Image (spheres, helix red, strand yellow):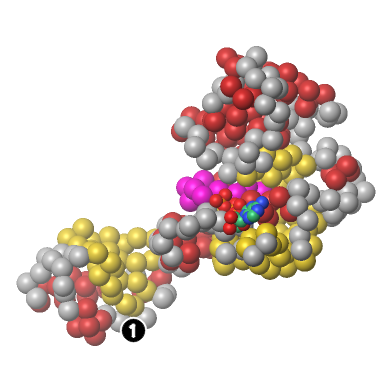
Amino acid sequence: MDTADDPLPIAVDVRDVVKRYGSVTAVAGLSLTAERGAVTAVLGPNGAGKTTTLEICTGFRRPDTGTARVLGRDPIRDARALRPRVGVMPQSGGIPTGARAGEWLRLMASFHRSPLSPQLLLERLGLCSVERTPFRRLSGGQQQRLSLAAAIIGRPELVFLDEPTAGLDPQARAATWELVDELRLAGAGVVLSTHYMEEAERLADHIVIVDHGRVIAEGSPVELTSNEREVRFRTRPGLDLQALAEALPSGTSATERAPGHYVVEATNPELVGPELIATITTWCAARDVLAEDVQVRTRTLEDVFLELTGQGLRES
Ligand SMILES: Nc1ncnc2c1ncn2[C@@H]1O[C@H](COP(=O)(O)OP(=O)(O)OP(=O)(O)O)[C@@H](O)[C@H]1O
């Protein structure tokens, strides 16, 4: 380990980065930090700028303006010094098509002073049966797992994983998550991009939600969701929501999300309690309406994400 610039708690410091591809602004003034010993998930819809941001952090692209510092260094100028300390799993695999799985891992291991065992990684990631198979003949999931193994074999201090579990089956996803947990426990910083809310909630200490090249929200999974509680119930469509709103305490609002599916949201989670439930069900009873499936829900990361980024499909 290089001790010259250690131990900074901040492993990645991206400030005001802008990156354009012709007329497309992929990253539009984005700032984020990621700590050592923690998993930072960059979450965003298609085309949000996640890959470009990771590529800037790994020295693959130069920002038009703004700065990126990785382990206190410049990812492009200090690429040689950073290489043994930083693991990278690019979205496209980044492994020569003719390289055989086992040989490639052993080669990668030979570049590091105290690597993980290639054999052990092949076993943990279910790649033993394809050890002698060239990269181009591996399935998409096997390619990803090999790329993950190559990124972490040198026991990096910091690792960037671009959508590490996209398209993986549940077993491979669980194996990947386990390895990420172990990296964090070993004190490494992990920065990963993902579309999967479950993955961000399960793995991340810090979630950065990105859209249109900017950070639109960030915090721990609990910080992002705990203030968000609501009551849901089902009954006949077309209730008089204005009348219901008059019966509800201030700081709450009622909507009919889909015909017959109602949500009462509160700005303050403490408002969501027995009294609110009683108010709703009493109001319904007075109209001879049965409120069914009454649920108090803490909103999920997915609820928050969709509210922030909108429900519409992205073209890119
Ligand atoms: N090499 C490139 N040349 C031109 N445009 C690009 C290039 N790479 C990315 N873009 C565009 O920049 C924007 C951001 O892309 P980027 O791949 O960073 O987003 P992303 O959040 O990783 O998306 P996804 O989740 O779909 O992988 C998109 O509009 C994309 O089409």
At x 54%, y 39%, the residue is 165
Q: Residue at x 10, y 69 (%)?
A: 289
Residue most extreme to the front = 22
Magenta-colored span: 191-202
- Apparent side of residue 246 relative to residue 26 in the rendered image (left or right): left
In the foreground, 63 or 172: 63
Q: Is residue 145 left or right of residue 98?
A: left
Q: In this view of the protein, which residue sits in the foreground, 219 or 76?
A: 76
Q: Amino acid at mark 1?
A: Ser
- Coordinates of residue 192 in the picture (x, y in percent): 63, 47
Identify residue for label 1.
250
Q: Would residue 194 be counted in the magenta stretch?
A: yes
Q: Residue 311 placed where, x, y %?
A: 40, 62
Q: Secondary structure at mark 1?
A: loop
Residue 268 shows in this picture: yes
Query: Is 40 left or right of 299, judged from the image as shown?
Result: right
Q: Quadrant of residue 87?
A: top right
Disc 1 crowd, CA 10 A, few/some/many (<14, 14-19, 20+): few
Question: 147 or 34, which lies in front?
Answer: 147
The answer to which quarter of the image holds residue 31 is: bottom right
Residue 115 point in image, percent of width and height: 78, 27
Ligand number 1: quarter of image: bottom right
Residue at point 51%, 50% (across, down) = 195
Is disc 1's CB within 8 Å of ligand 1? no
Q: Is residue 76 magenta?
A: no
Q: Report the residue that reaches farthest toward the left.
A: 288
Q: Residue at x 57, y 67 (%)?
A: 216
Measuring from the top left, give residue 42's x and y in whole percent. Answer: 60, 54
